[in-house]
Image (cartoon, rainbow, N blue to C red):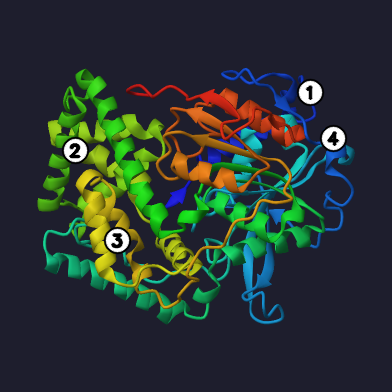
Amino acid sequence: MWVSRRVRGTAAALAALALTAVTACSPSPPSPAATPSPGDSTAATGTGTGTGQAAGAGNIPTASTLRWHPCTGQLAGLQCGSLQVPLNYADPGGRKLTLALSMVPATAPESQQQGVLLVNPGGPGGSGLALAGEVAAGISPQVAAEYDIVGFDPRGVGASVPELTCDPTFFSGDRPNYIPSSAAAEQVLINRAKMYAADCEKRFGWLLPYMTTINVARDLDSIRKAFGVRQISYYAFSYGTYIGQVYATLFPSRIRRMVLDSTVDPAGVWYIDNIDQDYAFQARQEAFFAWIAEYNSTYGLGTTAAEVQAAWYRARDRLLAHPIPGPDGGGPLIGPDEFDDTYLIGGYEDTLWPGLAEALSQYLNDGSASALLAQYEEYGVQNENEFAVYNAVQCADVDWPRNWAEWQTDTEQVYKTAPFEAWDNAWFNAACAFWPVRGPAKPLQIKGAGLPPILMLQGTLDAATPYAGAQDAHKLLPSARMVVVEGGGNHGQSLQVPEDTCVMNYLNSYLATGAVPEHPGLVNATCPAVPDPTPGG
């Protein structure tokens, strides 16, 4: 399933960035490294040589070949640029792709600058252009001023060229129910997956063999070279953490600092990781139902999680029988699949729970679909470019089971105890059973030797990148130190709204000085989770 941290509204991020620009040169407060983070008694220990000096010769981009211009539209306030990279790194002189880049330039004096900080929100398929502004606005102004913060659209994504799209109408019209009611209904969905894979081959067969995370990591190194620097720093969420692990394996000497927030298990790429998500999302959905039950006086959907769950499935059944039609009276705008897609996002970010609960309440108790429509339009609408890149990367990274009977058996097993996401996730990935490109039998073996200290941030209840898998990644990265957010279920522990001050103290300290928690083991520091939202919050 889609594994990307949702980026805050660009306008809000850039508004905050404007304030950052005003204060970036004001007198500095005490270093974040000097203040122990709330919720943990273990202070961080510095491993760099301090702000400015830590950058070292060769990491300040004084010889960049990139050309920048002011961004427009939703990215106004950032700098935009582009970079050509090889389609096939085995043939560097051959066909080229163009990556779209964004940047918030460093504003500190050059002697205090720390080089390039590449950022990525996840995916596969997530656009990273807006994230540069969000990171610049979200971290300490003094730290942000020291970095050239650079976002990018990976190959095939968004403003990069070409933009991969296989069937722009795939999510339009009357979609078949994710949960098949019969063998015939299942075959309809199988045929749909086969057709999507065939459409991708027909439109972009020349590109598909090169849509791999390994090539995305090579693209990162092409960006580094274009900046003319010896090393880069990297800060990523979700799937972006897998890009980081692959980059660290291929180019260990090119990493200066690395932050991995909500980390992918590299051993489960990708079939097993998706099954693990099913169970984790079930737990998050049940937590959502329990939260609604606490506020029955507000929502009127039940006093227990079981009652709320029954209400949710009652709404789903109603939408299956009577989809909400589109505004022109044409095909249905919201059926059961669209309903699932909308409520799935609540598993990523609990700040969405009040709006989702209110929409469910109005639909069932008042007969009004307006709030549900608004939630769907904001959070549930699928972007086919993201979906195409998601499939292209995951299907090519590693070979998937090619016998549908294996998928069916595994999904039915998951569905017995974790029905919320089981079939939805199977169909989201089903094209990989028929993909024209076969990946290697096993995923790339991640190697962590020779790396600098890495900061990992992880919630114990994260559904998209479950805690156990993140700790598996931690074991492969001996220099990594993990800050565990106990009871944290959001996907992405930093840059949250409301802010988790404890997490941000660790992040700012690390980016400023290279300091990481010194406690040994797999839990190197802990932070409390931000409180659950309240109705109307």
Quadrant, the C terminus: top left
The amino acid pointed to by label 3 is Trp
Q: Nearer the viewer, mark 2 or mark 4?
A: 4
Pointer 3 and pointer 2: residues touching (CB < 8 Å)?
Answer: no
Q: Nearer the viewer, mark 1 or mark 3?
A: 3
Give the mark nearer the N terminus: 1 vs 3.
1
The amino acid pointed to by label 4 is Thr
- The structure residue drawn at horizontal position 56% and vertical position 51%, both measured from the top left corner, is 240
As measured in the structure, the alpha-carbon distance from the residue carrying label 3 to the one carrying label 4 is 50 Å
> Which element carries disc 3, helix, strand or loop?
helix
As measured in the structure, the alpha-carbon distance from the residue carrying label 2 to the one carrying label 1 is 50 Å
Residue on which disc 4 sits: 49
Question: What mark, if any, has residue 427 been given in the picture?
Answer: 3
Say if 105 sits above or below 511 in the image. below
**Where in the figure is residue 386, as x and y percent of width and height?**
45, 59
The amino acid pointed to by label 2 is Trp
Q: Quadrant of residue 133?
A: top right
Residue on which disc 2 sits: 312
Q: Quadrant of residue 179?
A: bottom left
Camera-side residue of 501 and 458: 458
Give the mark nearer the N terminus: 2 vs 4.
4
Residue on which disc 1 sits: 28
Pointer 1 and pointer 3: residues touching (CB < 8 Å)?
Answer: no
Q: Residues within 10 Å of mark 3 (few under 14, many from 20)?
A: some
- The structure residue drawn at horizontal position 51% and vertical position 43%, both measured from the top left corner, is 470
Q: Residues within 10 Å of mark 4 (few under 14, many from 20)?
A: few
The amino acid pointed to by label 1 is Ser
Say if 127 sits above or below 529 in the image. below
Q: Residues within 10 Å of mark 2 (few under 14, many from 20)?
A: many
